[in-house]
Amino acid sequence: MSTDKRARLKEWLASEKATLQPLTFPQRELWEASPVPVADMANHICCLINVRGVMTHAACEAALQRVVDRQEVLRLSFLPGKERPVQMIRQTSDAQLRFQELAPMDRSDEGVEAVAAEVFSEPFDLLNGPLYRAAFLRRAADDHVLVFAIHHAIADGWTLGVFVEELCLAYVQGLMGARESLSPVALTYAAWGAAEREYWQPPELEKCAAYWKPVLADRPRLWSALEGPGTASGPHQRWVTRLPSSTVEAARDLARVTGATLYSTLLSVFQITLHRWTGNADTLVGTPIANRTTQPVREIMGYCASIVPLRMQVDPQRQFSDGLRAVHQTTVEGFGNAMPFSELAAALGDAAHPGHNPVFEVRFALQNHPVPDVTLHGLSATLKMRSTGTARFHIGCEITVFSGALEVVWLFRPELFSKVEIEDLARIFSTTLEAACRSPESRIAALLN
């Protein structure tokens, strides 16, 4: 850090223009338990927000400023520390918004995607911030796309829903002539982190670690021989498939009659799919949990989510319905013993290194965070995810219930898997899910034929 920057920092701290806070547990995961450097663009969470309505640059910037004033993570950056970095939260910060009139050749979906890719790929300055980037692209007077990228250290998937809702509310307030700021949050991200540190004292960590150590002993690693610097950075490739609403309803019905959940039902099918695809009956996935159990936490932007490893044995001779109940029970127990992932990896002695994610290689998620379609006073906004900022796995399956159907996003490292292989994996998942819903009392082996 230069002499000028050190002097400015001291002045900020002395005048209370900025405060320092320890890293939260989820933030520590990025520094201590991730196979990719924190500054890697794989840690960018990216989305497009399609906005319909007459907009102006000044009004958009004023709306974003209201959100920046309310959500402290948009005023946050990181300073080096003796043991680990610390958060620096500025009291105030100017909103950063680009406004661009698209040329006719760039107004197509493909053109917008190309412009967005440039925004998404720009690195963030972790020291000086801000750790978000917003570009407002005008296609027409009433047709805009907000390209938004934010670093995973200050955001998770839930954060995007909060951002869209608050930005739209702030914009409408501005149109109505309101001058006041958005109401303060009931709980700041820093306060949430402090409460987590207070709870996760050594006795509680040791109790949870005692549960996980036997569960994860001799856990399988399917692709460890292929790991290395070549699989350590950069975004995953995406392959998107969709399953009809009839499949969603059938899966929900199956969950109800077996006393399970839609999540457990889809996870059971995914485990069977992995078994057929890899030939390994011992399956292990990492699954995210929102970690937002109270309303105040649901209203803040920030990285609150955690990861729970779920390990199961696929028995081809078992009825699918019985296997589903077992998966549901394992899931309930796993969620009940969830602990900060950085602490879990440390307890297991599994350190991250280039290309190697501690504990698990495969990610499975049923996205349950709010993905709002906002309509307010002639203004509508629709959020479309592009990247989740989760680079710590080789294969990922992220499922969202979208317009009644299932959108299944397959994420994979192109250095390890071809698109043809992932298409085959997606086909197995789809056919197995349909077969399980149609005949849940069949043996698992019959579903694989």
Image (cartoon, rainbow, N blue to C red):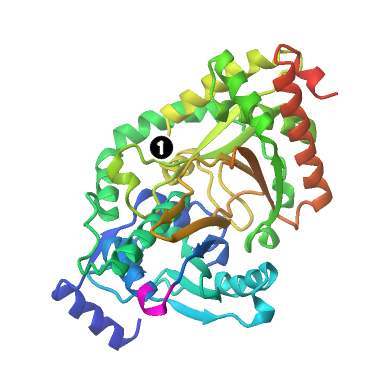
Q: How many marks?
A: 1
* Residue 160 found in image quarter: bottom left
Q: Nearer the viewer, residue 261 or 62?
A: 62
Q: Which residues are magenta?
A: 55-59
Q: Residue at x 50, y 66 (%)?
A: 149
Residue with the most extreme right position: 449
User: What amino acid type is highlighted by mark number 1?
Assistant: Met
Residue with the most extreme left position: 15
Q: Residue at x 13, y 75 (%)?
A: 15
Q: Is residue 92 above or below residue 337?
A: below
Q: Residue at x 44, y 49 (%)?
A: 158
Task: Assign the C terminus to one quadrant of the image.
Answer: top right
Residue with the most extreme front position: 378
Q: Is residue 194 magenta?
A: no
Locate residue 262, reporting x and y percent: 56, 28
Q: Is residue 83 above or below residue 291?
A: below
Q: Is residue 255 left or right of residue 198?
A: right
Q: Is residue 72 left or right of residue 243?
A: left
Look at the magenta stretch and give its main secondary structure: helix
Residue 176 in view here: yes
Mark 1: secondary structure: loop
Residue 122 in view here: no
Locate residue 176, reporting x and y percent: 28, 66
Q: Is residue 416 left or right of residue 99?
A: right
Locate residue 359, reporting x and y percent: 56, 41
Q: Which residue is mark 1?
A: 339
How dense is the environment of label 1, judged by Cα within 10 Å: few (below 14), some, or many (20 and up)? Answer: many
Q: Residue at x 54, y 20 (%)?
A: 260
Q: Nearer the viewer, residue 442 or 418?
A: 442
